[in-house]
Amino acid sequence: MNALLTASNNNNNNNNNNNNPSQNIFVNEREVVRTAGRQAISSFLDSHTCFSVLRASGKVVVFDTRIPIQLAFYALVEHDMQAAPLWDPSLCQFVGLLTVTDFIDILRHYRSNGLEVTSLATRSIAEILHQVKMTSTSNNKSTGLSPFLSADTTTTLKQACRILHDHSLDFLPVLYPEDMRVLATITYTNILEHLVTHFREQRRLFDDTIYELGIGTYHDNVQVGYAHQTLAEALDILAEHSLGALPVVMSTEDGDGGNGGSHKLLGVYSRSDITFLASASDAEDAISNLKLTLGEVLAQQRTDVATTPDALHTCTKQHTLQSIFEYFAQLRFNRLYVVEHQNQQEEGGSTATTDNSSPPILVGVVSARDLVAYFLE
C-alpha cells in the first residue's frame, strides 16, 4: 500500500502530481486492485493440491517402451488420450511422456532425414527415441522427449503451475507417492477448471481488460499460417516457435502498407489435431498428407467437437479478466483468439458489433498458459 504515497513524497514529481492528483490516485488504486487479485489467486493455488483436481474416476494409459511406436499412437487415438507416460522395464522407472504431437514430430523427423517410415510399424518406442536422439545430437538439434517430470498428490497447484511453466510443458503426470502409480495427467486447462469452479471472491478484482493487463500475445507478435500453406510448413512454424496451435488466416491489404494488411481469421490448426494421421492407412500415407494445405485440413476438421479445448473460440480486447474466467467456465478452452470485426476497426474499437458476415480480424491470442502465468508473476 506504500505505493499510494510514493509519488506525493517525491519532491521531483510534486508539480506533476499537483497537476492531476486524481489521475495518480486512480492509477495507484488500480495497481493495488490488480495486485490484490493476483495475490488472491496465488493464495488459492497455494492452498489446493494436485489431488483436488483429480476426477473421481478416470482412465490412465501407460506404455511399455518395448511396444511399437505406431501401435502406441493408435492406442492414444483409440482411448482418446493426448499423452501417456512411458515405462522402461529395464530401468524400472518412467522415462518420458509420449504425446500425439511427439508422433507427428517423429514423422517430420523421418521425412526431413530421408528415413524409412514403414519401420515405425515394427520398431519399439525405445528404439525410435534412441535413433531420434542420436540423429538430433549429430545435427546439433534438440528433438525427442524431455526428461520425465511429475508431481504427486501433495504438490500444490501453484507448484504444479511452476513446473509446467518453467519447463514449457503441456502435460504433468500426477503420481501416488506411496507406490509411484500414475493417477492422472493434468494440464493448465485442468487447473483453470478447478479454479473457476471453486474460487470465490466478493471483491471486484478482475475488471481490467486482458489487453490492459498484457495477458496474451498481440499484433505482429502473433504467428499465423495461411490457407495456401502446407501442413508441413505449418508444423515447422509450430515447432520453431514452440506453439500448440496456429491461427489460419487470409491476408487482405488494408492500405497501411504494413506486413501485408489485416489478418482475417478462418480457423485454427492445433498440433493435437490428428485428422491427417487418423485418416491415413499407414505412416507413408501420413507423410503424404503433410502436403495438404491448411485450407484443406480445415475443411476436413470434424464439426462435432466444438467443445474440445482446441476448438476455435474468440473474444475481444475489451473483455475483462472476469469475463474470460466466465468464458473458460463455459468453454474449457486451451486458447482464445482475440478478434475485431470490420465495423469495430472503423468505429475505433467499439465493443458493439453487428456485422459478422465476414471473417473477423485477428488481433491476438490468449492461452490458458498465459492466464496462469499472469498469477505466477
Image (cartoon, rainbow, N blue to C red):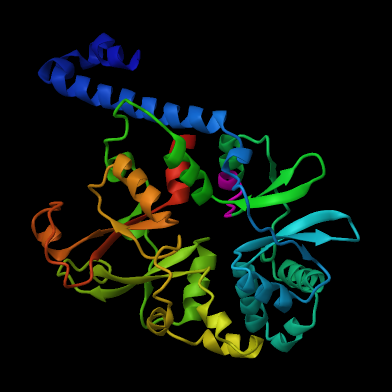
Query: In the image, residue 172 lies at what x, y percent?
Result: 63, 50
Side (left or right) of 127 relative to 155: right
Query: In the image, residue 133 lies at what x, y percent?
Result: 75, 67
Residue 87 visible (yes or no): yes
The residue shown at (48%, 80%) is 231
40 shown above or below 249: above
Side (left or right) of 351 relative to 147: left
Residue 105 visible (yes or no): no
Residue farthest to the left, as pictured: 347
Quarter of the image where one finds residue 53: top right
In the image shown, does 309 or 365 lie closer to the viewer? 309
Side (left or right) of 161 relative to 20: right
The residue shown at (17%, 67%) is 356
Q: Which residues make up the magenta segment?
A: 164-170
State which quarter of the image contains the N terminus.
top left
In the image shown, does 160 or 305 lie closer to the viewer? 305
228 shown above or below 202: below
Quarter of the image where one finds residue 5: top left
3 shown above or below 65: above
